[in-house]
Amino acid sequence: MSAVEIQIGGLGGQGVILAGMVIGRGLVLYDGYHVSLTQSFGPEARGSACSAQLVVSREPVLYPYVTNPHILVTLSQEAYRRFVPSLRPGGTLIVEEDLVRTSPLPDAVVLYRVPATRLAEALGRRLVMNMVLVGFFAAVVGLPHPDSARRAIRDSVPAGTETLNLAAFEQGYDFGLKQLAGSPVHASP
Amino acid sequence: MKADPRGVLAGVHFLDGDQACAEGALAAGCRFAAGYPITPSTEIVERFAQRVPLLGGMFLQMEDELAASIAIQGAVWAGAKAFTVTSGPGFSLMMEHIGYAAMTETPCVIVDVQRGGPSTGLPTLPAQGDMQQARWGSHGDYEIIALAPNSPQECFDLTIEAFNLAEQYRTPVLVMMDEIVGHMTERVVIPPADQIEIVPRRYTTKPPADYRPFAPEADLVPAMARAGQGYRFHITGLTHDERGYPTTNVAAHDRLVRRLVAKIRNDATRLTRVEEHFLEDAEVIVLAYGITSRVALRAVQMARARGIAAGLLRPILIWPFPEARLRQLASRAGLSGILVAEINLGQIVREVERCVGGRVPVRLAGHAGGSVHHPQELFETIVEMAQAVEIER
């Protein structure tokens, strides 16, 4: 397998980096992949554009930056606007349904929409929308293995919040499996 | 001796280079750090400050980098293993005390997570612009040891090595990271404590009456005394005699400074740590270190796939420079050029030119900082260099 580039973009405070960390940790510790995770963010603690980038490979990763993601996740309109032009032809795009309005995309792009924030609110904490997203990601992308993701969540979230975060993961995972059972939404008619 | 298991977080981890560096220091037995946290090195002291109190150690936030770089030396003379951590602007401030550590032969580690400069430059983005400063930044004649990790795994491994070399040679050792290596998260394997070799401090076996604190042993390195055990000695940055007392005697100065230089320079070949790829038949050698070495290896692989005989020489230990190995490679028939890739506008390339002495063309692929070269860009330069040779033939 050659390297797979993944980019997750959103706003500071949405848990973008932690989502990338959980996906990376699952892939590295439990699925046996090599992963380089880099992150970029503004100086503000909350509200600025931020993104997590993962290069995933069976071989050691030499070039750590994502240039043209195979899989792009956008959790804000700003991240969508900034990162969509770099999405690889034939790539996969996942958007937060209520926060991102999509524009016409190239034919070959596979588009998934997930109302991650609403699903998290249904659990009582909007904060766990990032773990809903990780669940959805694991379902539709197939990485990491769901059990690996669950273990990585336990490793990564603050003590005492495991149950809530895992519930959020399951919400997103189930939602993703249901979307897969139907056919993915293609970008253009 | 083996590492103290209490400081070793054995297992497989997903850590960034900064965190791995902190774990390396803990595994090496470091129990004291003083610092003035600065991006992109902050996560090192953040983790160290969180973990070290549980091991009976201490992190001290100082008023600035001058204080940080001298506080660690006080801790060392009191018996601790100690380090400080900084980035460009702080590294500049530490130069005075790096010279002090070299002169007083204080074993300590200074980590510089390089960011774009000069001045405050690019706090959150990478560079390799402090490489010659690492070698020459403090005044006067001295030799220094510096390591250049290219992954979080090596941030762990080479931090341990830095502490070991500091003790072995009684010298400050620099770990020259960069923002990418510091902030990238990857697999880091921390071996069990009984697989980690630790060089203990060299303590004198002589009784206090016979002890001369700066009288060298056979390898030119003097042994230290345990504080509080009845040994009396004096430490000064002034030129000193073997008893440690200041002197302006020219012969004593000559003896001291020559020894400080020789204890490391004489061992340069033994200190050589390089990684080599495809050098057996290489016509174009790419020399790169730190994060740039990974990108360069990718470019070399691309060139090989196109049938171009490219190879990679990566100094892991950058000071003293692996001069003998480079001279050997440069004098080999069939070599048509050396490409030096670094995130600065020409620092290590000067060292390469000096070693090569005009035998083959040396070319620089410089970068002002803020990112790393793209492999494609280096690949194209390799192709150009290989084609230039074809045309000459």
Image: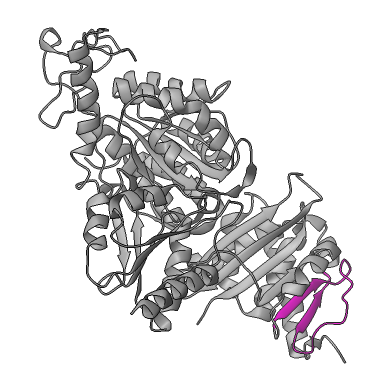
Q: Is residue B161 visible?
A: yes
Rendered residue at 42%/71% (across/down): B385
Task: Measuring from the top left, give residue B227's x and y in whole percent.
Answer: 28, 15
> Image quadrant of residue A86?
bottom right
Task: Measuring from the top left, give residue B289's x and y in whole percent.
Answer: 41, 55
Task: Measuring from the top left, give residue B2's x and y in whole percent.
Answer: 24, 42
Tell me if residue A52 comes above or below residue A177 in the rendering: above
Rendered residue at 38%/84% (across/down): B307
Query: Depth check: B23 or B91 in front?
Result: B91
- Tell me the quarter of the image containing the C terminus of chain B: bottom left
A71 inside magenta stretch: no
For this orientation, the residue located farthest to the front is B392
- Residue B386 appears left or right of A49: left
From which residue to which does the magenta span run? A91-115
Overall secondary structure of the magenta stretch? loop
Task: Measuring from the top left, give residue B212's x and y in whole percent.
Answer: 16, 13
